Image (cartoon, rainbow, N blue to C red):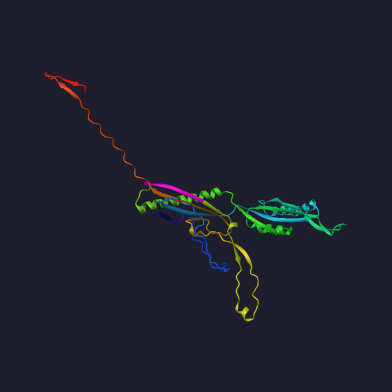
Amino acid sequence: MRNKIVFGLMLLGSLSTSAQMKMGNWAYSSAAPIVLSANNMVVPVNYTENNVITIKGMFNATPDAYVAIFSLSQEGLDESNANKLINDKIDKVRQGIKSIGSGLSLHVDIISFVPIYDKILEKKVFSKNSFTEKPVGFELKKNIIIEYKSSGELDRIFSLCTANGIYDYIRTDVVVTDMGKIKAQLRKSADSMIFLQLARYAKLRDIDIKDYKRTLAEGFTVIYPGEKYASYTAFSCTSYFTKKFNLNNDSKKKITRHYLPVIDKEFDFVVNPVIAEPAIQVMYQINLALSKKPEPKPKPVPPKPAPKKEFFFISPNGDIKQINV
């Protein structure tokens, strides 16, 4: 019988009460019940006849840097005209971000440059009327990539871009510059809990842990904010006055998205449990399997050698002489 022991101890300074979801309009946006995964990460354990200690931890990391991407499209009569018009917008944004903060930087990614065609009517002597494509201009597309340090700076970046005719916001990527430090902290916290559980396990079962072989498996899962947005439709219902006065209540419901992080109910410890803004969630699981060491085989006792026989001759005079047989 395989026993699985999952312990939930608290580390000082790293845990709070589990996050609980309050009822909101989101509950009415779908007929399906709200189901949150109870096991967001699984580290397989291929052991049989073993006792397994499992520790799970999560680190909610605030991003160190952000990268926002905006798209620009410009049409012009020729390449130089289209390039000048689009570069004027980019240069104004490049100058404007200097007033937002010293840590901001702007990079340009050229996406496409294609001609624009129009159809003109041509009359030929020996054929009917026909249309021919003729280039009448060019379309240039570029993306600007703005790196910034604080989430609050994005509002000012939006205002700067819209003031210069840039309205297409694609996305924002978040960055953690030292992921190794986060993983090391998760390992350290989990290790301390493992040793506590080993001592408790030995006491409860009245065994000597040294008599058990240890085998471990561990793994990480990293979830970025962009992976955890759920759709939401504004809830509306027919009121008493709508029915009484036969008012039209067929207005289109607004559809949007909201951030839905991994809930910390399955974890033994959580670092930075309060999520005030979308975070990078780093999850760690370690499984320590204990298996009884085989009993040492007794060393075979070598057989005692047979006694060596010796023969002696005693003369009538009492002399003793050994005889070699």
Question: Magenta stretch: dominant SS?
Answer: strand
Compared to 249, does 147 lie above or below? above
**Quarter-wise, where is residue 5 in the image?**
bottom left
Residue furthest toward the front? 126
Q: Nearer the viewer, residue 173 or 98?
A: 173
Q: Give the image location of residue 200, x and y in percent.
A: 39, 53
Q: Does 156 lie within the magenta span?
A: no
Quadrant for the N terminus in the image: bottom left
- Which residue is rendered at x = 69% and y = 56% of the image? 70
Q: Give the image location of residue 213, x and y in percent.
A: 40, 46
Residue furthest toward the left? 316
- Which residue is rendered at x = 48% and y = 58% of the image? 266
Q: Nearer the viewer, residue 165 or 151?
A: 165
- Please give left or right for residue 30 compared with residue 218 in the image: right
Residue furthest toward the top? 317
Quadrant for the C terminus in the image: top left
Counting labels gives 0
Q: Nearer the viewer, residue 62 or 143?
A: 143
- Please give left or right for residue 246 compared with residue 189 in the image: right
Q: Give the image location of residue 206, x and y in percent.
A: 34, 52
**Which stretch is magenta?**
210-219
Q: Give the image location of residue 151, x and y in percent.
A: 62, 56
Q: Does 214 lie within the magenta span?
A: yes
Residue furthest toward the right? 125
- Please give left or right for residue 209 compared with residue 15 in the image: left
